[in-house]
Amino acid sequence: MIGDSELGGTMLLLGASAVLSGIIDNIPYMATMGPITSDLVQAMGGDANHVIWWALAIGADLGGNATAVGASANVVVLGIAERNRNCVSNHVLPSPLSRRAAPAVVGAAARLEGVA
């Protein structure tokens, strides 16, 4: 899919990580993608500080901030808010958190990818 393009692979992983980590918690996502990314880095002849690792980490971080279920800390905060009767509705994309966070995450990802 990316051929020999290191830049293409980096941008693809950054964008995919941002999207997928917003849908699933970023900790299991990173645990799953770690071995895959390691194989990809080895195939590209990279070292432990390869830019692909940064794309994975930054993408997962951005995605975790996009939705309430994207990061464990968000889930904890939702539990505390609910216990104090300050409930955030719908815990996924239609929620007030996601409506505010998702555009910022998309903008940050676009800026990182050089689109904006």
Image: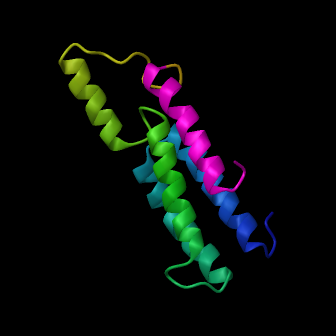
Membership of 112 in magenta stretch: yes
User: Which residues, given as a range, are shown in magenta?
Assistant: 95-116
Q: Residue furthest left?
A: 84
Q: Dividing the image into 4 quarters, which one contains the N terminus? A: bottom right
Residue 101: image x %, image y %? 49, 32
Residue 18: image x %, image y %? 57, 48
Residue 74: image x %, image y %? 34, 36
Q: Nearer the viewer, residue 86 or 21?
A: 86
Q: Nearer the viewer, residue 33 or 51?
A: 51
The quadrant holding residue 65 is top left
Residue at position x 78%, y 72% from top? 5
Residue at position x 41%, y 32% from top? 68
Residue at position x 65%, y 86% from top? 45
46 shown above or below 29: below
The quadrant holding residue 51 is bottom right
Left or right: where 25 falls relative to 108: left
Left or right: where 71 falls relative to 79: right
